Structures are given as structure tokens and as C-alpha cells.
Image (spheres, rainbow, N blue to C red):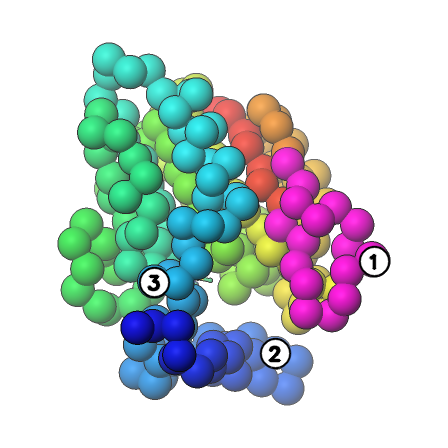
Amino acid sequence: MFKNLKYKNPNKYLIKKNLFIRNFEKLYQKIEDPWNQHLNFFEEESVIILKSLIEKFSNKRKKLNLLDVGAGKGSLKKILKKNISYVGTDIHNKKYKDIFYDDITKFNKKFKNKFNFIICLKTVYYVGDKIKIVLNNFKKYLKKNGFLIISYNLKKKSFSNKYLTDLKLRKMLKKKLIEVYTIEINRELSQLNDKEEKTTLLIFKK
Ligand SMILES: C[S@@+](CC[C@H](N)C(=O)[O-])C[C@H]1O[C@@H](n2cnc3c(N)ncnc32)[C@H](O)[C@@H]1O
């Protein structure tokens, strides 16, 4: 029933004249599900890989806290086992269960040393110009030995490339945390057409 919905580009509310305008308020008024989470979230390669990574890194007996930032509707919760306690945050004001308003560019002291996992899927693109603050916050929110998993999508002509690339992000993370794996999907950006995306999954540990 959803397949016939016409795709509307969310970026026209977020980027204008080569600058971030980030009018998320208007975006969410105009587009019901801007990220098409109802369509393809569970088929994305990065989500399939993420599911097995979380299972691999989880201690089955212990209760673990997971923070999903830029969570959208919180679809990620559906792939988690019961021993993982899920909190999602986002900057929309929609009422979804377990999703709370929080801006990742602002430090939230309630999250300090609280999480075994921080997951940030397809979101750093929108804060590429504030990435240092965002990574500092993530590090403070992690418990010792906690995992930070970021997915970063980019196209050859992505707007965000002028602030951030996957290589720069990896370099910054390596200075702050311990690298576990970095996984590249569609590695050679130069060989993709303008519409295709490269996805990098960065997995780091505190
Ligand atoms: C492309 S969507 C990804 C949603 C979901 N993580 C997924 O993989 O389907 C990017 C999300 O980041 C959120 N976002 C953008 N800037 C943010 C910020 N500063 N703080 C928190 N969330 C933000 C948006 O509202 C949006 O839900």
C-alpha cells in the first residue's frame, strides 16, 4: 500500500544555496515519513550487518542500554533482542514510543556514561559542520567498553562532503576511540553514478 507514495526530497528543507538551513520543523510538517523508514529500513545492508554486530557484542545475560540517535520512528528497536533496553532520540516532536526529543549537537548530561551502545544511522550527514561536538558528546555518553556504531552515506556529489567524508570521520574517531571494524559498502565512490551511494559503517569502542 505504501509502494505508490511519491518520493519527496527532504533535503530541500535542510540545504539551501549551498548552506545548511535545517528547517526540520517544516520538513516534518510537509512530509509524513521523509526517510522512507516504512519501506526499506530492514532491507538496508547496513542494518542487516548492524543486527549481527549487536548480537556479537552483546553479553546475553546482562541488560544493556542502547541509544539510537537520529532514530526517526525508532525502527531499529524491532531488530533488538529483549536484553537490550532501547532509547531513541531525534529532533522531531512526533510521538513515537521510546523516542525523545534531543539534539545531538547539544550535550545532554542525563546521558553521561550511560550507554553500552550508541547507534547513529544516516544522521551525521546533517551535522557534518558540527561533527567535533557530536563525537565528543557520543564519547561522554558511552560507558567504558561501550560501542559506537555510525553509518555514513555519501554520494559523489553529496553536499555534506565539503565538511565531512567517511575518511575524515574515521580519522577523527581513531583519535578518540578504539577502532573495531570499518566496513565499506560500494567502496569505490568514483565508480558510482551520481544517484548511487557509498555506505561506511564505522564501529568503535571506548
Ligand atoms: C536520514 S534520517 C535517518 C533515520 C534513521 N536513523 C534511519 O536509519 O532510518 C536522519 C535523522 O536524523 C535526525 N537528525 C538530524 N539532525 C539531528 C540532530 N541534530 N539531532 C538529532 N537528530 C537529528 C533527523 O530528524 C532524521 O530522523
Q: Which is closer to the viewer, label 2 or label 3?
A: 3
Q: Mark 3 or mark 1: name the one nearer the start of the chain.
A: 3
Marks 3 and 1, how far apart at CA: 30 Å
Secondary structure found at label 1: helix
Name the residue: 67% across, 41% down. 184
Question: What stretch of residues is rendered in magenta?
Answer: 183-199
Label 1: how many Cα within 10 Å (few below 14, some 14–19, many 20+): few
Percent across and percent down for residue 149 are: 49, 37
- Quickly name the residue at label 1: 190
What residue type is disc 2 on? Leu
What residue type is disc 3 on? His
Q: Is residue 162 magenta?
A: no
What residue type is disc 1 on? Ser
Q: Mark 2 or mark 1: name the one nearer the start of the chain.
A: 2
- From the Cβ of disc 3, is ligand 1 less than 8 Å away? no
Left or right: 10 as drawn, with respect to 175: left
Left or right: 195 as drawn, with respect to 123: right
Q: Which mark is residue 38?
A: 3
Name the residue: 23% across, 69% down. 93
- Quickly name the residue at label 2: 19
